């Protein structure tokens, strides 16, 4: 096996080593190409990871349903009728659609994104006020700074407690003041603060200044009866969100006498769509990086081939002598191809080492920041292996050009050359 | 050892054909030291190239040590060259980034001789040409005579049947030329067959037989009284 032929390697390193500067310049193209490839791939990965981090805490396979106004007259009802869901709808949907994993009903004071004045000790804040079930935490995760989120006991006992956003805290409390156990007043009703959450500044459905109280408490305190504002729904991992969305809409349309073709009556938002868009975006970015990188690599390898061609020309006489001394065309060819492989592989590894260093540096600069989606920019082992093998493969193919030129030289002509 | 019958060779020069060798008949026995002489254009280099399997003949027979040399592939030619022939060139043709020892060991490398054995053999041949102390030197650190002696050691290292020397003294001053011829004579004394292409009368007379080529044919082939180079050294 020629791979383990020590003499071949000695020959090759001898040849490459005798002109270190040129060898280095030859490798430069591939080094840069590898740096570009790995940096692009790594950055695309970092971006992908960054987006994943942004969306961490939001169930990607989720949707939101709320009521709007009808746009078609149906069964004697005029258009423009306001659709108001009832709390019983939650159970109906849960029962009829087994693909629903979590369904968290929610009710809001006023209409969507309306603010209500919340008072405490002569201070006030315009906040959104939501009545929620603890399950909502499975769909949009709250980062709790202090205390706890709503729990089952709060619901069962209709406890007059609340969880407030950091913005709300800033408006109602002094800096550093302990808010847990303090009361705030909403529409004349007092609620005790049990937790403070940090606005999830990545995906924010709740608004930045919000107060969460248990759904059952909300019903009693603000006298909303069996009304339900909207539903946050997480579907099972292998189910397509639009499928469930359609099922839900069909059931609700029947229940509330909505025209089957009425697209406006039921408001919905498919979270998975955004995820798919972003995943698609990062995938395209990765593909593009690979594409650009591979062509840069090709250019680098061609540069090596070019230099080897020049080298072959310069070494015509040497090759002639070698052939006169008994080197077969195969031996000559093999030496030049292996030179191409060694140059490329070595340069590739250097480029890889440099780019991994740069990526590490980038990671330490941007990786921990919340506001820039760039986390752990690295290439995966398969990505590296594919690039590396592709590069070596290319170098073999392209190394054959100078190698064939070398064997085309007839020893007699080579020797004649002065 | 060498048998050539009715050898023809012509080169195409555009639309013209240049008939260089016009029927050469020649035999050389084992242990001969033959000078091939002729002015430039006489075909002596072409003959040497064909003998060296660096070029093929158009017509005729060439038998080397009982093996007919015909229709060789490049690979086969390389193997035969390695096995049968040792080359000595006018311009030495040493590989300039390899030490004297490595240069001598190169034919052995192509014979797939192991590294250790190669070094020992190569050193042995360097010793025989009197350059053992120069083994680790690069060709650029050697004088012309020394280079040619390294080249001779290299030609002998593969223990070929025939040594082919193409103007071996062409690039050397007369004193060094005689030193090299002295070496060639001594190698011949040991029984090696050597063909020397030269256009210098005094060098030719240090061989045992002179073959004169003119316009592609042998015009004279005579045995001579060998002049020993030793006396001039």
Image (tube, rainbow, N blue to C red):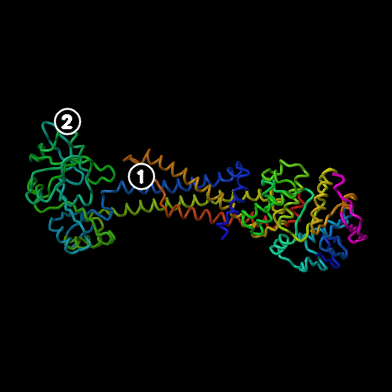
Q: Is residue A366 left or right of residue A263?
A: right
Front residue of this view, candidates A340 and B157: B157
The subunit carrying tag 1 is A
Instruction: State the image coordinates of residue A193 (x, y, percent, origin top left).
Output: 12, 40
Front residue of this view, candidates A266 and A29: A29
Q: Which residue is mark 1?
A: A375
Q: Which residues are magenta?
A: B207-233
Q: Is residue A122 above or below residue A43?
A: above
Q: Is residue A401 left or right of residue B66?
A: left
The subunit carrying tag 2 is A
Does residue A76 appear anywhere in the picture? no
Does residue B160 appear anywhere in the picture? yes
Label 1 Cα neighbours within 10 Å, binned few <14 / some 14-19 / many ≥20: many
Q: Earlier in the sequence, mark 2 or mark 1?
A: 2
Q: Nearer the viewer, mark 2 or mark 1?
A: 1
Q: Which mark is residue A174?
A: 2
Label 2 Cα neighbours within 10 Å, binned few <14 / some 14-19 / many ≥20: few
In the image, are marks 2 and 1 on the same chain? yes
Front residue of this view, candidates A314 and B44: B44
Instruction: State the image coordinates of residue B124 (x, y, percent, origin top left).
Output: 70, 51
Q: Circle 2 — which element?
A: loop
């Amino acid at each position: 096996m020629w791979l383990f032929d020590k003499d071949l390697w000695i020959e090759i390193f001898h040849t490459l080593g005798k002109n270190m500067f040129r060898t280095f310049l030859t490798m430069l193209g591939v080094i840069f190409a590898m740096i570009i490839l790995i940096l692009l791939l790594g950055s695309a990965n970092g971006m992908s990871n960054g987006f994943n981090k942004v969306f961490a805490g939001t169930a990607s396979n989720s949707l939101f349903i709320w009521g709007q106004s009808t746009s078609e007259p149906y069964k004697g009802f005029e258009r423009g009728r306001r659709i108001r869901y009832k709390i019983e709808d939650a159970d109906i949907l849960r029962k009829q659609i087994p693909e629903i994993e979590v369904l968290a009903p929610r009710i809001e004071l006023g209409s969507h994104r309306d603010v209500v004045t919340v008072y405490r000790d002569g201070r006030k804040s315009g906040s959104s006020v939501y009545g929620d079930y603890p399950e909502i935490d499975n769909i949009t995760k709250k980062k709790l700074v202090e205390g706890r989120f709503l729990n089952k006991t709060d619901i069962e006992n209709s406890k007059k407690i609340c969880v407030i956003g950091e913005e709300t805290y800033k408006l109602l409390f002094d800096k550093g003041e302990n808010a847990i156990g303090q009361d705030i007043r909403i529409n004349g009703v007092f609620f005790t603060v049990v937790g403070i959450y940090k606005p999830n500044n990545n995906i924010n459905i709740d608004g930045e200044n919000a107060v969460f109280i248990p759904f059952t408490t909300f019903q009693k305190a603000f006298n909303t009866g069996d009304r339900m504002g909207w539903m946050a729904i997480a579907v099972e991992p292998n189910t397509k969100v639009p499928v469930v969305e359609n099922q839900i809409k069909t059931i609700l349309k029947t229940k509330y006498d909505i025209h089957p073709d009425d697209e406006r009556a039921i408001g919905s938002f498919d979270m998975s769509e955004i995820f798919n868009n972003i995943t698609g975006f990062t995938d395209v970015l990765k593909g593009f990086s690979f594409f650009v990188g591979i062509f840069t690599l090709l250019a680098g390898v061609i540069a090596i081939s070019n230099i080897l061609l020049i080298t072959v020309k310069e070494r015509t006489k040497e090759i002639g002598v070698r052939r006169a001394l008994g080197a077969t065309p195969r031996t000559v060819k093999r030496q030049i191809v292996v030179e191409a492989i060694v140059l490329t592989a070595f340069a590739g590894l250097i480029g890889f080492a440099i780019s991994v260093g740069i990526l590490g540096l980038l990671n330490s600069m941007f990786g921990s920041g919340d506001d820039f989606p760039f986390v752990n920019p690295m290439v995966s082992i398969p990505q590296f292996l594919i690039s590396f093998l592709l590069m070596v493969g290319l170098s073999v193919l392209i190394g054959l050009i100078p190698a064939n030129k070398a064997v085309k030289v007839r020893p007699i002509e080579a020797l004649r050359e002065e | 050892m060498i048998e050539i019958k009715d050898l023809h060779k012509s080169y195409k020069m555009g639309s013209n054909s240049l008939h260089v060798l016009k029927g050469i008949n020649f035999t050389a026995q084992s242990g001969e030291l033959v000078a091939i002489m002729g002015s430039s254009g006489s075909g002596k280099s072409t003959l040497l190239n064909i003998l060296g399997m660096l070029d093929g003949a158009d017509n005729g027979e060439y038998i080397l040590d009982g093996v007919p040399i015909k229709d060789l592939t490049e690979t086969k030619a390389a193997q035969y060259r390695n096995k049968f022939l040792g080359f000595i060139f006018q311009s030495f043709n040493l590989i300039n980034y390899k030490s004297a020892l490595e240069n001598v060991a190169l034919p052995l490398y192509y014979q797939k001789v192991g590294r250790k054995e190669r070094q020992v053999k190569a050193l042995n041949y360097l010793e025989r040409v009197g350059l053992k102390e120069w083994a680790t030197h690069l060709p650029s650190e050697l004088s012309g005579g020394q280079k040619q002696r390294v080249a001779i050691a290299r030609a002998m290292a593969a223990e070929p049947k025939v040594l082919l020397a193409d103007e071996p003294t062409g690039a050397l001053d007369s004193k060094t030329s005689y030193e090299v011829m002295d070496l060639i004579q001594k190698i011949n004394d040991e029984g090696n067959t050597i063909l020397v292409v030269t256009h210098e009368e005094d060098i030719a007379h240090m061989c045992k037989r002179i073959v004169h080529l003119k316009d592609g044919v042998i015009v004279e082939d005579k045995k001579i009284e060998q002049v020993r180079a030793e006396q001039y050294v």
